Image: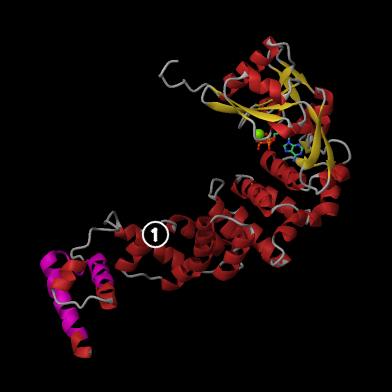
Amino acid sequence: MSNRKTKKLSARQVMLDVVGCLRENGYEALAAGGCVRDMLLGKKPNDYDVATNATPQTVTKLFKRTLTIGAQFGVVVVLLGGRQVEVATFRSDQTYQDGRRPEKVVFTDARHDAQRRDFTINGMFYDPLADRIIDYVGGKDDLHKGVVRAIGSADRRFEEDHLRMLRAIRFAGRLDFQIEQKTFQAIRKNASKLKHISIERIAIELEYILADPQRKRGLNLAYECGLLENIFPSLGGDDLRFGIKIASALPKKCSFALALAALLINCDGKNSRRICRDLKTSNELRSQVSWLISNRQVLLDAVPLSKGRLKQWLAKPLFEPLLQLARIHARVTSTGKDQLRTLRKQIADLGDEPLTPPRLLDGHDLIKLGAVPGPLVGQLAEELYLAQLENHIQNRSQAVTWVKKWLSRHHNQD
Ligand code: ATP
Ligand code: MG
């Protein structure tokens, strides 16, 4: 075996190789689902999935490196050319008991496999060897019309798997499509069932919707269908509508944390932390969201800032998104505009002064100068650093003089 690293192939090439290998071995194999939709839209697919009549067992035999975690549902992941391709055996999903996952799958053919997929635009196949679309569900038409339509009875499809309701929003939002009327009505009817599915799966879909440049459309649809109120039961309609307004006004490209903070803007820091905890988001995301929400007003209230404080704010890792949130909130509510103008001028006036210069004296220096080890050293160090950031102290000897004065003041107070 060669020691050289495998060259990373394009996702499309890997799909072609996987399809080619299955076909050479006498099996049917097609690109399936989202990648076909994206190809027809002229967009680069996120990933290419393959559907085949070969069983998972056969797929694992045909390819050297595979992951078989989903094999009982008919899915094998093939590792090839530095990529992963999901290879799914044509199947019908049987008896959904809990609105989440099929209990059992039955291997079938492409036509039946199309029927178990969620929306017509996601239910097509592509034969890359013949360069031909295979469409059993009218997906091409709906793609053309810009419509998200459930395959089969919308009501039944959403009862089978409640997550599909959020997926409908995801695709309609992202592609700027309409949700077909019956599909839309079925979502409204079934929206309250969302609480039966795992919060982790909901949080993933929420991230798709919020991080998408088209979040305005996705959020409005999710609100109109009654899905948002089921994801955030503690928020009232006014809070949600206001949050959607703020989140929609954010730049197209923004982080999940910022978009979620915008949506939850009417909560206080504590409430937003609780909501994030309920959504089981990571601790990091939870603290980012609550920091953004709690500090938007704190920042504005502190303006005008001293030079030192300004540098401290600017050095905070989330200062940029905080400022974006504050700007948009100010624009939408017509408040805080003066503070933001002052802040902008202060930032411009600061020029390129370093925000976090190295400290002139460290803790050891302070103790050598007579500070008693303990909490007071921390306070002294912070005040000294702030004086340095304010440019009141420029060098070590000025710092020593400043510390001596500080210590005599504090010793006199003792
Ligand atoms: P994306 O571009 O966001 O990856 P996608 O359409 O590829 O979108 P995936 O979640 O990757 O979506 O799923 C791949 C395909 O599997 C879908 O296009 C659809 O045909 C099918 N599918 C996925 N989830 C479901 C579901 N919950 N119910 C029915 N079919 C589904
Ligand atoms: Mg996909």
The colour scheme used here is secondary structure
- Indicate whether residue 402 is drawn in magenta: yes
Task: Report which residue position mark 1 lands on.
Answer: 316
Q: Quadrant of residue 342?
A: bottom left
User: What's drawn in magenta, residue-wise?
Assistant: 381-410
Is residue 68 shown left or right of residue 191? Answer: left
Please tell me whether residue 106 is drawn above or below residue 328 in the rendered image. Answer: above
Q: Residue at x 62, y 21 (%)?
A: 15
Of 282 and 338, the residue lying toward us: 282
Residue 380: where, in percent of width, then height? 25, 74
Residue 209: where, in percent of width, then height? 65, 47
Please tell me whether residue 327 is drawn above or below residue 84 in the rendered image. Answer: below
Is residue 96 shown left or right of residue 51? Answer: right
Check disc 1 and report its element: helix, strand or loop: loop
Please tell me whether residue 55 is drawn above or below residue 318 in the rendered image. Answer: above
Res. 296 visible in picture:
yes
Q: Residue at x 84, y 27 (%)?
A: 112
- Indicate whether residue 96 is drawn in magenta: no
Please tell me whether residue 115 is drawn above or below residue 308 in the rendered image. Answer: above
